[in-house]
Amino acid sequence: MEQDIKLLKGNEAVAEAAIRCGCDGYFGYPITPQSEIMETLMQLEPWKTTGMVVLQAESEVAAINMVYGGAGCGKRVMTSSSSPGMSLKQEGLSYMAGADLPGLVVSVMRGGPGLGTIQSSQADYFQTVKGGGHGDYKMITLAPASVQEMADFTVLGFELAFKYNIVSVVLADGIIGQMMEKVQLPPYQKRLTNDEIREKYPWATLGKPANRKPNVITSLELDSALMEQRNLNLQKKYKEIEKNEVRYEEIACEDAEYLLVAFGSSARICQKTVELAREKGIKLGLFRPITLFPFPTNEIYAYTNTVKAILTVELNAGQMVEDVRLAVNGTIPVEHYGRMGGIVPTAEEILEVTEKLIAK
């Protein structure tokens, strides 16, 4: 079969992949550095080819609630935003989690707090991985480190969302959203008809079936005992996801004495740091979490038997480092190095910090 290869920005790759993977609807609002997702969808006009709805909502709050409604009908629906916009979506995301609904959110991080900067950041780790809205809920979080993964994770995000009835987030930083690379796009998938949705997802609210009561989608439960059971069911689902869906990449880790842990664009830079360190005879490896939830806790802990210390590298003041420290449980030193405000560290800069850690 002929491959569909294009040179695209990360944001453009998301739009192209969404159309191809059978997405029913996109509801969004422009904000830098992710605006090209909606702009590309508007340019491609998929409503003329696949029937996909593309709508600019009046706000981020409206967009996530449109996704909530579409998800309740069993449709493949998505939105995208950046850091301040994601903050506005938190209530709707919590509602979707409480109602056990699948959906896809693409978040392309910029610096903060507040309006901050339109430059790249990784400071939304807490907001996304820890569940920024209210209640005990989680979202599957995929962290791409290439334009190819922006496309691949759009497809995977939908698959996981419907496998577990959960919100999936593709959590990229501005560098990955804006950079251009060659991408092999996925094949087209047919959108499901309403009858097919009723058959495959009997919980969907697509009109009252003749032989049963109408479905009701809600996150509200006034009986405390039933509300607790709902929460217990959610926690059971999260445990199943933690068991089955952990993803990560290891680079030069076989004989590593020291380990870098980084995701997204930071991992790309750290890969060069590993090359520089190896040239100097330093046995340095790179561990890249691909799923931030579920976090590869056990896989990182396994390195406590072989490495002397870990350095996390993030474009923030230190967020993922907390999960790495929890993973190693005090067995080896874990330090953090980060830049903020849109400043991106060089591979040489990270190597210098690593050498200081080794010298301690």
Image (cartoon, grey):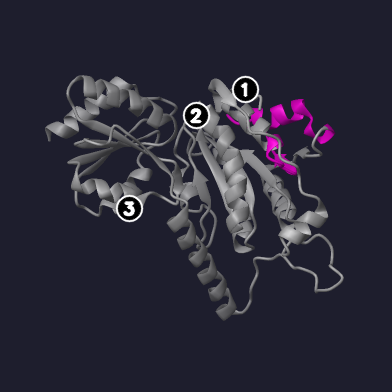
Dot 1 falls on a residue whose secondary structure is: strand
Badge 1 is on which residue? Answer: 5
Give the amino acid at mark 1.
Answer: Ile
Farthest right residue in view: 210
Q: Are marks 3 and 1 in contact (CB under 8 Å)?
A: no
Farthest front residue in view: 1
Badge 3 is on which residue? Answer: 298
- Judged left or right of residue 158, residue 53 is right
> What is the C-alpha distance between the residues marked 2 and 3?
25 Å
> What is the C-alpha distance between the residues marked 2 and 1?
15 Å
Q: Looking at the rendering, which quadrant does residue 351 occupy?
A: top left
Label 2: few (<14), some or many (≥20) within 10 Å?
A: many
Reply yes or no: does residue 132 show up in magenta.
no
Give the amino acid at mark 3.
Answer: Asn
> What is the C-alpha distance between the residues marked 3 and 1?
36 Å
- Please give the range of residues in magenta: 19-48
Q: Nearer the viewer, mark 3 or mark 1?
A: 1
Residue 43 sits above or below residue 201 on the image: above
